[in-house]
Each structure stands twice: as C-alpha cells, then as structure tokens.
C-alpha cells in the first residue's frame, strides 16, 4: 500500500480507521517527532473538531465525495491564512493573535476534506531555503537531522516526510515548495501564474512570483490537490488555459550542469540524465540545452527575487506597524533594502524579470519541457544559511548556489515540478525538476507520474494512521 493521503482517505472512507483515530495518530506522531521542529503552532482541539465533523458526515453519507476526507494536515506559518490558525511568519515581530478568516486557497484545501490542526515552521518571513527562525523551532530533516529540510516550507516538508501528516500546505515564491520537497524526497509543484488563487487580500502573491499549494508524498496526491484548488482564481492575473497532458512524443530539453558558478554534484547531474533516459524510453526525444542559454536568466532571477521580497517586506512592516527591531538581522537588512529601493530601480528589476521570461519562451520554441537539477548538492547542514549578517546579496548567492534554477520559474511565471528520482550513497533523495511553458502544469504532472513509476525513491517513514 502506498503511504500517501489518498491511501489514508481510502482507509477512513472504508471504515478501517476513523478520522478521529487518524487525527490522534498524527498528534501522537507529532509528539514523538517534536525534536524535528517541524511544527510551530499546534491546536489539537481544532483538528479533532474537524475530524469529528468528517466522521459525522461519513456516518450520514458513506459515499461522501471529497478526496481527502478526514486526512490530518498542517498549514504553513506564512501565506494562507487558514481559519482558526494564527500566523506569525516565524517572526518575533508578529504576535499570534486572533486568527484571520480563511483565504481562498485555504477554503479550497479544506473543502477537500483535509483536517488542519497546526502550523509548520518557516524561516523568518520566508526569507531562506532553510527553516531555522531565531524565534524557533529550528526545523531538521527527518532523513538526517543534521541537515536542513529546506525552506521556506521546510516544516511542511519535514512533517510530511516524517509521516506526521501525508500532505501539507506550502507556498513558493523562490523555490519554497520545490526545494523542501527536494530535500525530503517529496513532490511539489509551483503552478503557472494565475492558476491558483491568491486572494482575497493578495498580500502573499508578491507581484505574481508566489504560488500556494502543497508538498506531497505521491504525484497522485499532488494531481488531486491541484485539480481541487485550480481555476477561477479571481485575480490579480488572468486564468491561463491549461494544456492537456500530451499522449504523443515530446521534446525533452536536458540541462544537467549549471555552469562553473553553480556546480552540480555528480549524483544529482546523473539523476537528470537518468530521468531523461527514462522518458526517452517512452518515445520522447532528448535535446541538450547548453547552460549558456539559461545563465543570464538564472542570474537575474535571484536579484529580481531579492528586490521584490525586500519591497514587499518593507511595505508589510510599514502597513502592519511592526517593530522591525524585533526581527533578525538579515530580515532587517531585506526590509532596509526594500525601503531604500527607488521606483526606477524596482521597475528596472521587474523589466529584467520580463526579459528572463522571454528567454524561457525562446527556449521553448525548440523543446516542450525542460528537465534540470533541482539542487546542486545534498541538503545543506543546519546553519549553512545564517541570518546573523546584513549582506542580502551574499544570502541570495548562497541560495542560488544550492538551488540554481529555483527562482527562475517564479520570476517568469512558468510552472515547475520536482520529484525524487533515485538516492545517493547516504540514502538521500536525488531530485529533478521539470519546467514547462505557461499552462503546461498537467503535462508536468503526467511526466512526473511516468518517472514515479520507476520506483527509484521509497519513503523511509510510514504515514500516521496507516501503521496498522
């Protein structure tokens, strides 16, 4: 049996386990895994009330048509928000007060039957590809606690990989779904711009670079939650038309090396080549894409990301009347960067992002999808991305060295998906990334399902509630 959210939902639907029993199992696993630091806020009563409501619905209607009915889940301590869960963004600047009403994406995820009972750990204000907020807890990778689970959805990925929950809400503005998924052996999708809702406040869409969905243990879970959440986003961008998964041969672009500035280790480069060969065996053709065609766009995406999040943070601190002196040193530096950025400089940065999008469109004249490394190395040791300095450029460089093509899909708006395709000698996942043109989300999911069937990655931990 596949240990994922679909399997747990089936067990609840058929009476092998109740939703309340599944919630108790998740709460027990959360307590046993407390040293991972994956959960920043817990509300067992909220989760149990939701689980009881699902059990009551199942008693009245055994055929209840929701895909994840009774499956425990966690929301991210950033984005959303989710009804009943007070978000603090991993920061001492924000006190956990009265929870806000649920956002559009929260409402859609809850409508799938997921039962939310807490918030997952994030770096302060989501500013890192590791999840070690000074406010605590430090989040560790369940596959090796000395390593990061990634960020900023690191707590979500750690909780899913450890089996505390089978699926968790996550957000992605610069790789924040895909990098943690890659670190923890999970699958994650940054959808095409405009496909998923960002309202009603639009405070987390970040000028279009951010997207919210989930980290999952299987492609089928990811496909289900995507289908349930997508469409009719109601702004601020037009809903793009989604291209149906192609049944014929595709031209698969391959980039397995990312130049001298972003050295990719041999194992992770080989995983890209192996994934390409697997797709070639299905009748797709491979096209080698030289790094030189992507290098400038990849470089620019990091600086554009830094400017956008800096300006957004400066505006948030001002409008929410926060005391930025309570923030970590690097967070203060990003806020200062945003405050100091002129309108002309911001416009030039945004225009550079547009040109990066044009670069990708030109590449997709020659190919249908692009297969790349997700990470350049194994997950970084805890402490590798410190906040005890004010050099925002250095922080961006460090993150780009770890995940060279993480922010490019965010800046350009293109969809990107990661999944594990093998293990290294230490038993850590070898993730690959598939990037597609706008609206090709279903194509990426279809290709990911094909790669997943090779069975090159097996989850180390069972899902709470499916242990029996």
Image (tube, rainbow, N blue to C red):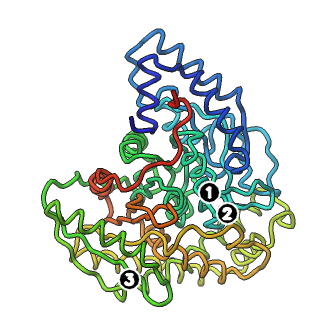
Quadrant location of the N terminus? top left
The tag earlier along the polypeptide, 1 or 3, is: 1
Q: Residue at x 59, y 21 (%)?
A: 20
User: What label sits on residue 294 in the rendered view?
Assistant: 3
Residue situated in front as seen by the camera: 169 or 421: 421
Viewer-nearest residue: 104 or 125: 125
| Residues under numbered marks 1 and 2 in contact, where contact means CB atoms less than 8 Å apart | yes
Badge 1 element: loop
Give the number of the mark in front: 1 or 3.
Answer: 1
Query: In the displayed structure, would residue 16 be above or below residue 152?
Result: above
Q: Residue 114, percent across and down?
A: 52, 32
Q: CA distance from mark 1 to mark 3?
A: 31 Å
Of badges 3 and 2, nearer the viewer stands: 2
Answer whether labels 1 and 3 touch (C-beta < 8 Å): no
| SS at badge 3 | loop
Q: Residue at x 81, y 65 (%)?
A: 327
Badge 1 crowding class, 10 Å Cα cut-off, few under 14, some 14 to 19, many 20 or more, is: many
Identify residue for label 2: 146
Q: Earlier in the sequence, mark 3 or mark 2?
A: 2
Residue for point 58% across, 42% down: 103
Instruction: Identify the disc placed on residue 141.
Output: 1
Q: Residue at x 24, y 70 (%)?
A: 252
- Kindly indicate the quadrant of the structure image that contains residue 19: top right
Relative to 242, say whether 285 is above or below: below
Where does the image place residue 280, in percent across and percent down from the top left? Answer: 19, 66
Single out the residue that lies furthest toward the top. 60
Q: Earlier along the polypeptide chain: callout 1 or callout 2?
A: 1
């Amino acid at each position: 049996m596949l240990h994922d959210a679909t399997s747990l939902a089936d067990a609840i639907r058929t009476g092998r386990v109740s939703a309340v029993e599944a919630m108790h199992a998740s709460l027990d696993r959360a307590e046993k895994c407390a040293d991972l630091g994956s959960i920043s806020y817990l509300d067992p009563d909220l989760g149990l009330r939701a689980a009881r409501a699902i059990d009551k619905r199942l008693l009245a209607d055994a055929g209840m048509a929701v895909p994840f009915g009774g499956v425990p889940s966690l929301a991210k301590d950033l984005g959303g928000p989710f009804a009943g869960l007070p978000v603090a963004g991993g920061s001492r600047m924000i006190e956990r007060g009265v929870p806000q009403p649920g956002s559009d994406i929260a409402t859609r995820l809850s409508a799938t039957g997921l039962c939310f009972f807490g918030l997952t750990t994030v770096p302060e204000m989501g500013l890192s590809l590791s999840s070690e907020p000074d406010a605590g807890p430090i989040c560790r990778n369940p596959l090796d606690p000395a390593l990061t689970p990634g960020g900023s959805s690191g707590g979500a990925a750690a909780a899913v990989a450890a089996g505390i929950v089978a699926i968790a809400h996550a957000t992605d503005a610069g790789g924040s779904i895909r990098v943690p998924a890659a670190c923890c052996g999970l699958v994650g999708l940054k959808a095409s711009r405009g496909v998923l809702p960002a309202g009603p406040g639009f405070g987390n869409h970040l000028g279009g670079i951010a997207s919210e969905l989930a980290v999952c243990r299987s492609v089928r879970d990811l496909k289900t939650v995507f289908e349930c959440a997508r469409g009719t986003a109601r702004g601020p961008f037009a809903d793009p038309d989604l291209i149906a998964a192609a049944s014929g041969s595709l031209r698969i672009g391959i980039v397995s090396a990312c130049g001298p500035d972003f050295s990719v280790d041999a194992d992770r480069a080989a995983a890209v080549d192996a994934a390409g060969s697997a797709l070639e065996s299905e009748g797709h053709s491979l096209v080698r894409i030289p790094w030189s065609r992507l290098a400038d766009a990849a470089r620019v995406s990091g600086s554009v990301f830094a400017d956008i999040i800096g300006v957004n943070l400066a505006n948030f601190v001002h409008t929410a009347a926060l005391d930025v002196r309570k923030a970590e040193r690097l967070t203060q530096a990003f806020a200062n960067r945003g405050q100091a950025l002129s309108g002309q400089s911001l416009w030039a940065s945004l225009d550079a992002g547009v040109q990066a999008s044009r670069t990708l469109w030109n590449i997709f004249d020659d190919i249908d999808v692009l297969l790349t490394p997700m990470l350049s190395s194994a997950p970084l040791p805890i402490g590798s991305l410190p906040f005890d300095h004010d050099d925002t450029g250095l922080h961006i460089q460090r993150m780009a060295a770890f995940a060279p093509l993480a922010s490019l899909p965010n800046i350009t708006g293109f969809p990107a998906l990661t999944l594990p395709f093998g293990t290294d000698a230490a038993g850590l996942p070898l993730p690959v990334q598939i990037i597609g043109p706008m609206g090709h989300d279903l194509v990426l999911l279809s290709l990911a399902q094909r790669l997943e069937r090779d069975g090159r990655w097996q989850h180390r931990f069972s899902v709470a509630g499916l242990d029996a």
